[in-house]
Structures are given as C-alpha cells and as structure tokens.
Amino acid sequence: MILKMTKVSIIGPQRLLPEVMDSVYKSGVIHIESPPDSVKDTPFVGKVTLTAEQRREMAELEGILGIAKKTINIIKPLVET
C-alpha cells in the first residue's frame, strides 16, 4: 500500500540525535533520507538559548525520564512473560 508522505522534523538536544535516529530507523515507521546536497554542511536549526525557567523545567523532565527508564527496566521482564 502506498501512503501519502508527510515531512517531519525531529527536534531535541543534539547529543541525543544518534540514539533518536537509531530508534526511529529501527521502528520502521518513517522513511529517512539524507539531506539534499543543497543543504549539506549548513545548520538546519540555530541554537536556542533557554531561559532560567526553561532550564529548570528541562532538568526536571530529564530527572523524570531517568526514573521512567529505570522503571521500564524493572518492569520489562514482567511484561515479556
């Protein structure tokens, strides 16, 4: 079946890009292409400076993410049985 394609952007911290792209690729739900030559070696998105409140929120969310990952690792064997 041929489906209409929609362009998507993945936005997040640069340090997580390899892990995110690997997960997206393995999921098989998105066709990934290299950027065209016309945009190679140019920045796609400029750096964003976070406010103090945004930095606090990011730190809190990263802490919650850490707890969620640990929880998944604990309950994952229970789900697979």
Image: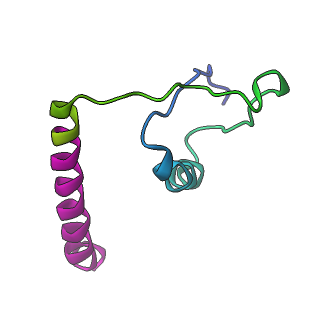
58 falls in the magenta region? yes
The answer to which quarter of the image holds residue 78 is: bottom left
Out of 7 and 76, give the one closest to the viewer.
7
Pick the quarter of the image with the C terminus.
Answer: bottom left
The answer to which quarter of the image holds residue 8 is: top right
Q: Above or below — where is 40 with respect to 79?
A: above
Q: Above or below — where is 17 with respect to 46?
A: below
Q: Position of residue 47 (x, y in %)?
A: 47, 29
Out of 41 and 17, give the one closest to the viewer.
41
Q: Position of residue 16 (x, y in %)?
A: 46, 51
Q: Above or below — where is 62 with respect to 3?
A: below
Residue at 56% over, 54% down: 18
Residue at 42% over, 38% down: 12
Range of magenta residues: 57-81
* Total labels drawn: 0
Pick the quarter of the image with the N terminus.
Answer: top right
Q: How is the image coloured?
A: rainbow
Q: Above or below — where is 4 with respect to 80?
A: above
In the displayed image of the protein, which residue is found farthest to the right?
Answer: 37
Out of 64 and 44, give the one closest to the viewer.
44
Residue at 75% over, 24% down: 39
Q: Is residue 22 left or right of residue 77?
A: right
